[in-house]
Image: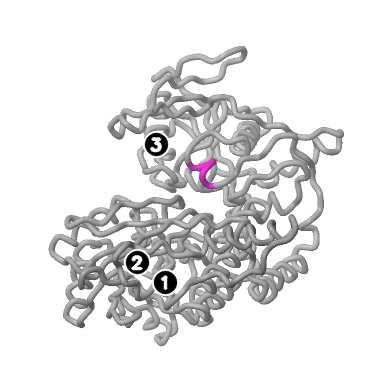
Amino acid sequence: MRPPNFPACKDRLGIVVLAAFLLTFAAFAVAQKPGMRPEFSLVQLNDIYRIDAVENGNAGGMSRVATLLKQTKGPVFILHAGDFIAPSLESKYFAGQQMIAAMNFLHRLAPMYVVPGNHEFDEKQPQMFMQALRASQFTWLAANLKLGTPEPELNNKIAGHTLVTMGKMKVGLFGLTLHGAQNGKDRDYAPVDSNYIALAERELQALEAAGAEVIIGLTHLSIEQDRQIAKLRRQHPKFMWIAGGHEHYAQKEEMSTEAALITKGDSNARTIWRVQFGRENGQIALAVEKLKVDAAIPLDKLYQKEVAEYYRAELEKKLPFLNDKIGASETVLEATEEAVRTGESTWGNYLTDLMRNAFGNLRADVAILNGGAIRIDDNFSGELRFEHLWRTFGFATRVAYVWLKGKDLKQDILEHAVAAEPGNGRFLQVSGLKFEYDRRQKIGGRVQNVKVASATDWEELHDNRIYLVAVPDYLYEGGDGYAFKTKAVMSIPPGPELRLLTFEAISDAYAKGKAIAPATEGRIVEVK
């Protein structure tokens, strides 16, 4: 692709315009591998919950992906590695149809292939997922999912694999999604088989028999599971790439003779992957590039009109108070997924501080909130609106109290929080507690220097002392693999709703002419 010829720039404005164009063009230009004759490109998306951009409109967004697709030279296809229907503010009111509209828009620009993620099955009843299937125009893949909805024709809409001609190549695609026991959703209408390796082997053999020249796995699994599947390349050299989701942060593990390439992008399309396939010295080759999707890439005008602006107007009809001011913050409230799933954050500190007083005069010693409960995926400050609150809580979040021994708090709760790969939603935000952790150490021995707030200072966590801990209902019930119920000496079931507690605290401060100003305080420190 060549930029058009420009007349000589005779003034400063012309230079600025030319520079802006070249920067934008650079974002779209495909990094071609030397010696490779490209035939087609694949753009990978995963874990996108918003139809609009994030970080005050400056990062990510499907609208910018649409622009990128239109600017990509040659045949282009989309792989979406799952998590899109829910949770989000819009999904509560449109049952995920806003995301299907966004994905259908992209599908009209470039054929899209999708694996369902765990959040596609947030609802215990099948209606929301059935509506998504009916409305979708793209192709669904999941070899380990057997739908059992009341509509047989919908149950056949998800295939295990497909063979597609891309450029001049026959490309095989297969899909795998998470089982309930591994952070997926256990639903009667969507039973999932967890024999990932055996099923991947079966799909690889079927695609090889069908004549695939390249095979790609489209997965919504943990990185550990993807790594095991990637090793099947040893016996199946046509298996070249796993386009994965679930972790919410950008990852890349190179292809070798021993394993397929693995890529995962940042949530809400902050960064995405573009993989180009072609031939080099007669052999199939690929070139991989990570694209930063930011304000340098313009929004697509048609997408904005047909999807973003339309659903925003509909949302404001349903929630006319959405833009109303409820308070203010003097500090930046850090609530991106990177912030709340990898370390201490100001918004996490504020929310957990409130949780300690959820039951009035019975103040908890410690409060714990999983990063995955904070769904807004943004940084914000200054004026606080209802929208910030509504987007923070993708689920109802009720606070429970549990009494735990110190040794259980450390070994079963804090160690569990840092045992997963970075970016996992089980990572904790805390109050009344500070600790250090070292990912270089073995799982189960990563947490150190745990201290609990006293009336005047910090004191060492005592193994046999019993501490009162405030936790969200999701973790109380065993979500993300936590053992609060089984380890509790005593408990108070979930009661106060955290969103309401937050609204009351912010609006009460505002009524007194005050702004909130949470700060980071060294509660969570990663040792590197």
Figure colour scheme: one colour
Residue 218: give its label: 2
List the residue tagged with mark 3. 418
Mark 1 or mark 2: which comes first in sequence?
Answer: 1
Q: Nearer the viewer, residue 78 or 296?
A: 296
Magenta part, dominant SS: helix
Look at the numbered discs 3 and 1 and tell me whether their residues touch, using CB distance below 8 Å. Answer: no
Q: What stretch of residues is rendered in magenta?
A: 337-341
Q: Nearer the viewer, residue 503 or 142?
A: 142
Helix, strand or loop at disc 2?
strand
Q: Is residue 95 above or below residue 224?
A: below
Q: Amino acid at mark 2?
A: Leu
Residue plotted at (68% across, 70% down): 311
Look at the numbered discs 3 and 2 and tell me whether their residues touch, using CB distance below 8 Å. Answer: no
Residue lying farthest bottom? 153
Q: Quadrant of the C terminus?
A: top left
Q: Amino acid at mark 1?
A: Val
Q: How many numbered discs, if any?
A: 3
Q: Nearer the viewer, residue 172 or 5?
A: 5
Left/right placement of residue 171 relative to residue 306 reads: left
Distance in Å between CA atoms under marks 3 and 1: 30 Å
Mark 3 or mark 1: which comes first in sequence?
Answer: 1
List the residue tagged with mark 1. 114
Identify the image quadrant of residue 241.
Answer: bottom left
Identify the image quadrant of residue 186.
Answer: bottom left
Look at the numbered discs 1 and 2 and tell me whether their residues touch, using CB distance below 8 Å. Answer: yes
Residue 103 position in % (x across, y down): 53, 73
Mark 3 or mark 2: which comes first in sequence?
Answer: 2
Residue 419 position in % (x across, y down): 35, 38
Residue 258 position in % (x across, y down): 17, 55
Please say whether residue 409 is one of the residues in the magenta stretch.
Answer: no
